[in-house]
Amino acid sequence: MFKIVSAQFLAENIKKFEIEAPRIAKKRKAGQFIMLRIGTKGERIPLTIADSNPDKGTITIIAQGAGRTTHELNQKEAGDLIDDIVGPLGTPSHIENFGTAVSIGGGVGTAIAYPTAVALKEAGNHVITINGARSKDMVLLEDEMKSVSDEAYITTDDGSYGFHGFVTQKLQELIDSGKKIDYVLAIGPIPMMKAVADVTRPYGIKTVVSLNPIMVDGTGMCGGCRVTVGDEIKFACVDGPEFDAHLVDFTNLNDRNRIYGKEEAASDESFKHRCHLEGNH
Amino acid sequence: MHDDNHKETYTMDNKTITTKERLAIPRQEMPAQDPNERVRNFKEVNLGYTAELAQQEAMRCIQCKDPVCIKGCPVNIKIDEFIHLVAEGDFLGAARKIKEDNVLPAICGRVCPQEDQCEKECVLSKKHKPVAIGNLERFVADYERETGNVKVPTVKAATGKKVAVIGSGPAGLSCANDLAQMGHEVVVFEALHELGGVLMYGVPEFRLPKEIVQQEIDVLREMGVTFQTDVVVGRSVTIDELIEEDGFHAVFIGVGAGLPWFMGIPGENLVGVLSANEFLTRVNLMKAYDFPESDTPVFDCKGKNVAVFGGGNTAMDAVRTAKRLGAEHAYIVYRRSEAEMPARVEEIHHAKQEGIEFLLLQNPVEFQGDDRHWLTGVKCVKMELGEPDDSGRRRPVAIEGSEYILPIDMAVISIGNGSNPLIKQTTPDIEVSKRETIVVDVNTMATSKENVYAGGDIVTGGATVILAMGAGRTAAKAINEKLMGTAQSYNEW
């Protein structure tokens, strides 16, 4: 059992949890994830570790309610218990002093981009962050991102805050301004990561994305998370989750993530219905 | 004792039965659920012998002076002695006799490939059917458990030595059992949230009820073994940390073969192509057959065509699971003939009874999909058997121009597993083979790293429960000798 120490919403439907997991807190490196299972009948879902505190023995995760398990998770409060958390899984981010590094987070992907931005800063990079959200009230970790950035930009789709437009437009603007960019990390929805890869490809800028395929165990056993990278089939859980954005077959990833679309929607509906009946929101 | 056991006559219930009469008793069939009924449920197929059936079957054993069946058993169970006890009606005595050599008889009685081991050697098999040793093993273990007579083994006085066992599958459980009995403190680390390894995530309920596995684990708990789930050794903690920081005196690695192989043919990443590990883990461990009561979904097989590629036990488990989930057609596609199939004969037999369609001597060459990239079919080529290959089995050769398309909605790849690279990556001083299996001294299961031992599929590659169990026990003995200072160098022998 893993105890939630604190829990608060960062934006609508996006909640931050600090959870006691001393072994993971001690080992965890930027880019790694956990598998989480809420209770006996729960599914196992991967969530990237946003932060950790080895002294306190806690890890931080940020979850957006998107399906049954994340909706259930987002109802949890401080003091509640999670049955299973295992990690840290995956290969840590490759960190070095690239020169100028741009860390792009789209939506809840910002939570995943943040720890790597921290590590890039610590390695001596000139860190530029582009933090994209639908609108002002959905902007995540603004202060945290600013604190590790030499240059911090916020973009909103509706223009309610920061740059009016997509993260890719801001990135293109930076490239066009003549800034020499050595490394780009992009984490967010699949279309966003694909769009970032398309922007940097013509310039040959090394670009890395963190993928979110379907996983069951998260340790290499099921192969559900296999992704096409260049000519190779890779397991995101052990070979990734970070891969060269210019080699990832995003279409294949998108297709494969839809295999349980019908079932997931039905499961989410039945969960919401049950919550409604129980008057538990 | 068994030297005196071979008798020309046998006394049962005051009747004297001659060897000839015993040989006339037909092999007692295992009662099973009706095939039409069982394809609609996940309950165990075999129902088990009654006491009468067990005694009848035990009477068939002619108690050879030289019981060659024992040589066929990887852990050398005293088969003749336990069967003699069954014939006499001493079922508890029989169970204890087996447990001198095999700590998991209820499991091995169900999953061992007896026809390639003990029963293959049985002298009766030359002229008659062999004694149903596996069925008898299962019967006595079930009898002991169901009558509440499972004794928690006596544990020796604490030695003050601490051993970490990595993995709670058959190798880890048997190693933990023996080490605990020897008085060592044993902590078992498991990566998943449930204990039992492949016995839980791989072998389906209809072949091995999970309750049996959990009861075996409960016995270990009562012996003082502690279990930590959700720990991935290599990630959550390394072997070096277990030794240097957590104070373990020895480590046993029994992590199994954990990385599913794919075939490397076009279209293998289409939606609807899964590994057997994923399909079975969803259904067995995550209970997806109970979706949406359980949160984990599985590919909706109802009315669909499902093909499983492979000929081993896992392939049989997967195809029979698909059938139970409502598949219209559930195919086994195997590139050799039935004679070369590595699956247990009983599983093949049960699969056929359940309406599984066997497409033998056929090999997939390409998966095909629709414009949404969902699987629609597989192009297969027909094969014929050529000269024997390295494995001694005749090599299948493609017949030119024989390609055809088999329409399918789901493909399950069940062609075996490689080694998970985690231990190797994080403990580079453990020597591994080219196939990435851990290299050990077979007498002790010692690895190249001091005080670290390994056994089971991580050493052999995909093999059997009983071999893993035997390896766990060999390692436990060697660890005990090393820790207690009684180890001898095998090189001096």
Image: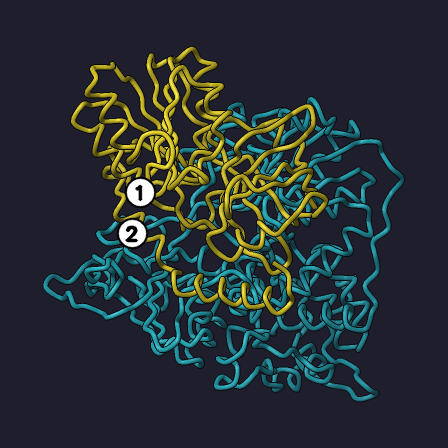
Chain colours: A yellow, B cyan
Q: How many marks?
A: 2
Reading the image, the residue beneath label 1 is: A233
At 75% from the left and 46% from the top, the residue drawn is: B178
The x, y position of residue A89, in whole percent, is 51, 36
Secondary element type, mark 1: strand
How dense is the environment of label 1, judged by Cα within 10 Å: few (below 14), some, or many (20 and up)? some
Pointers 2 and 1 in contact (C-beta within 8 Å): yes
How dense is the environment of label 2, judged by Cα within 10 Å: few (below 14), some, or many (20 and up)? many
For this orientation, the residue located farthest to the right is B157
Reading the image, the residue beneath label 2 is: B269
The x, y position of residue B363, in whole percent, is 25, 61
For the question of whether residue B170 can be seen, the reply is no
* Towards the viewer: B60 or B65: B60
Quadrant in the rendering for residue B450: top right
The x, y position of residue B136, in whole percent, is 67, 72
- Say what amino acid the circle numbered 1 marks: Ile
In the rendered view, would you say A268 is above or below B45?
above
